[in-house]
Image: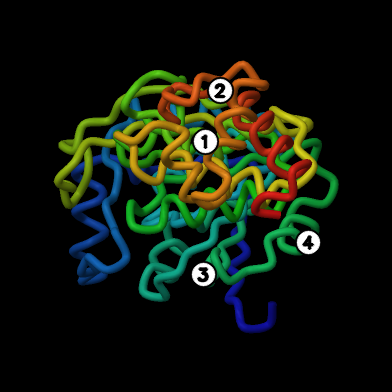
């Protein structure tokens, strides 16, 4: 981690004197540093105190717990996390924001800022180094839209020792993550997220509470990590490939989508296998539960299909 820049703040347990997450203060900081937003980094700074309160409350923090923030921006959420948690570490990819964060968080000794790309960091090592001695760690963040799914899947697939993931993301993506079988929002992302955790929509966030304003509304979603995956499967990679195949063309039946996955010569055997698992072949992927996907995956592996 020698290439990362660490900023250690001063004066433990003191709340910052001036809240950053307001329109006035945000504009002052932008003007002071001559900061220009990079569209490529998806930078939108939150300026609503109530939303900040909702995010921090959902994370269930206390002085014995830690918070990992991804993309702190100018520190509006970081300030609040420092007041609620015993240890806060924020990872910021934009080097131009480091001096701003140093000023904003100057009186927060328990806060560390790391300059780096969270998608390239060894997060297991980071958690071990930054949160030794805390009773639990949660990820709390306002994620850039363009990297929401890669970041969340990295957090989940690496099986990090996290309690919760509380993030503000694009509204439609949050609804897909929390969707139940049978609706148009339910898809492979819903299955992937719910395999690892229990999702709960915390609140909706209008686009008007950001500087600059994005083109779409957001939502805060809380993902509570499961002790073990929602369903037991012998091969996770195969399970997720079955799920992806089932949603390959949403208007097609399960039998048609899965025939493309296992081969046309197995169409009849596939139909028989689905019936044996009490799954109607004419159903669509969006109607299947995680357990039904798991049954299909197990049966395919037993038959030697797609292993």
Choose between 294 and 119: the one closer to the eye: 294
> Which residue is disc 4 drawn over?
129
User: How far apart are the two marked residues, 1 and 2, measured between alpha carbons?
Assistant: 24 Å
Mark 2 vs mark 4: which is more N-terminal? 4
* Circle number at residue 289: 2
Q: Residue at x 58, y 71 (%)?
A: 120
Q: Secondary structure at mark 2?
A: loop
Are circles 2 and 3 on residues that touch, CB within 8 Å?
no
**The N terminus - image quarter:** bottom right
Q: Residue at x 25, y 48 (%)?
A: 25
Mark 3 vs mark 4: which is more N-terminal? 3
Query: Residue 96's x, y, as percent?
Result: 36, 74
Are circles 2 and 4 on residues that touch, CB within 8 Å?
no
User: How far apart are the two marked residues, 2 and 3, measured between alpha carbons?
Assistant: 35 Å
Mark 3 vs mark 1: which is more N-terminal? 3
User: How far apart are the two marked residues, 1 and 4, measured between alpha carbons?
Assistant: 22 Å
Left or right relative to 292: residue 203: left
Query: Residue 6's x, y, as percent?
Result: 61, 71
Q: Residue at x 30, y 43 (%)?
A: 46
Q: Secondary structure at mark 3?
A: loop
Relative vertical location of residue 266 with respect to residue 200 in this rendering, above or below: below
């Amino acid at each position: 981690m020698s290439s990362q820049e660490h900023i250690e703040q001063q004066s433990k347990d003191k709340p910052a004197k001036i809240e950053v997450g307001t329109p006035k203060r945000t504009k002052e900081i932008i003007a002071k540093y001559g900061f220009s937003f990079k569209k490529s980094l998806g930078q939108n700074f939150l300026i609503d105190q109530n939303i900040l309160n909702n995010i921090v409350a959902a994370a269930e923090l206390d002085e014995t717990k830690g918070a990992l923030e991804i993309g702190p921006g100018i520190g509006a959420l970081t300030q609040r996390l420092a007041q609620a948690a015993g240890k806060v570490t924020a990872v910021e990819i934009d080097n131009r924001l480091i001096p701003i964060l140093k000023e904003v968080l100057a009186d927060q000794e328990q806060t560390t800022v790391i300059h780096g790309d969270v998608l390239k960091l060894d997060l297991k090592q980071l958690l071990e180094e930054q949160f030794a001695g805390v009773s639990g760690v949660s990820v709390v963040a306002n994620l850039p839209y363009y990297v929401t799914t890669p970041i969340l899947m990295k957090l989940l697939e690496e099986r990090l020792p996290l309690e919760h993931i509380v993030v503000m993301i694009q509204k439609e993506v949050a609804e897909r993550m929390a969707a139940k079988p049978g609706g148009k929002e339910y898809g492979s992302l819903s299955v992937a997220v719910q395999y690892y955790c229990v999702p709960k929509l915390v609140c909706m966030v209008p686009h008007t509470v950001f500087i600059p304003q994005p083109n779409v509304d957001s939502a805060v979603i809380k993902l509570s990590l499961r002790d073990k995956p929602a369903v037991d499967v012998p091969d996770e990679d195969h399970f997720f490939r079955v799920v992806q195949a089932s949603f390959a063309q949403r208007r097609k039946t399960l039998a048609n989508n899965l025939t493309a996955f296992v081969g046309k010569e197995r169409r009849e055997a596939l139909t028989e296998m689905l019936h044996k698992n009490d799954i109607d072949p004419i159903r669509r992927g969006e109607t299947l539960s995680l357990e039904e996907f798991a049954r299909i995956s197990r049966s395919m592996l037993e038959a030697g299909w797609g292993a």
